[in-house]
Amino acid sequence: MNTHKSQIFIGFGLVFLGLAIILVRSNVSQIRNTSRPVPRQVKIERIASWMTIPYVSRVYRIPAQDLFAAISHDPSVIPNDSIEAIARADHKEATQLIKLLQATVLQEQHPQ
């Protein structure tokens, strides 16, 4: 009689373990399938000419390719130079590029 109770106990334990594994796997896959992390709510006024596009991308959690597209710059030319250096290379004002980046960050943080 004692072995019968232990078999039932083991059976319930295995069912519980199986359900727990299914629950964990479904939550992990749901987390992986989320499209993009929510951008940080960081003040856009802090974007400065010394920053690089990859740096702005990391701080604001916006893909670098979106930021390069916003300033109409080919990232393969000088991907790790500062906004100031990109402005000089593209014959533009750094303040103009900063405003474009700020508008892009705002759009990503508050999509319409």
Image: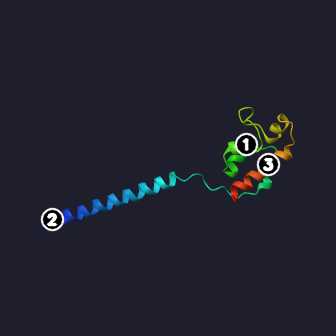
Label 3 vs 2, first from the N-terminus: 2
> So how many labels did they put on this image?
3
> Which residue shows up at 86% across the image and 36% down it?
91
Whether residue 48 appears in this view of the structure is: no
Element under disc 1: helix
What residue occupies the far top of the structure in this picture? 77
Q: Dot 1: few (<14), some (14–19), or many (≥20) neighbours within 10 Å?
A: some
Q: Of circles 1 and 2, which is in front?
A: 1
- The image shows residue 112 at horizontal and vertical percentages of 69, 59
Q: Does 28 sit left or right of 102 as displayed?
A: left
Dot 3 alpha-carbon crowd within 10 angstroms: few under 14, some 14 to 19, many 20 or more: some
Looking at the image, tell me whether mark 1 or mark 2 is earlier in sequence order: 2
In-front residue for pair 31/11: 31
Q: Which residue is mark 1?
A: 69
Q: Amino acid at mark 2?
A: His
Q: Secondary structure at mark 3?
A: helix
For the rendered model, the colour scheme is rainbow
CA–CA distance in space, label 1 to label 3 = 10 Å
| Residue found 70% across the figure and 42% down from its top | 54
Residue at 72% of width from left, 57% of height from top?
42
Image quarter of the N terminus: bottom left
Q: Would you name the residue on which mark 3 appears? A: 100
User: As rendered, which of 106 and 79 lies closer to the eye?
Assistant: 106
The residue identified by callout 2 is 4
Residue 90 drawn above or below residue 106: above
Cα–Cα gap, marks 1 and 2: 69 Å
Q: Secondary structure at mark 2?
A: helix
* In contact (CB < 8 Å): disc 3 and disc 2: no
In this view, the mark in front (3 or 2): 3
Say which quarter of the image contains residue 21: bottom left
Q: Amino acid at mark 3?
A: Leu
> Mark 1 or 3 closer to N-term?
1
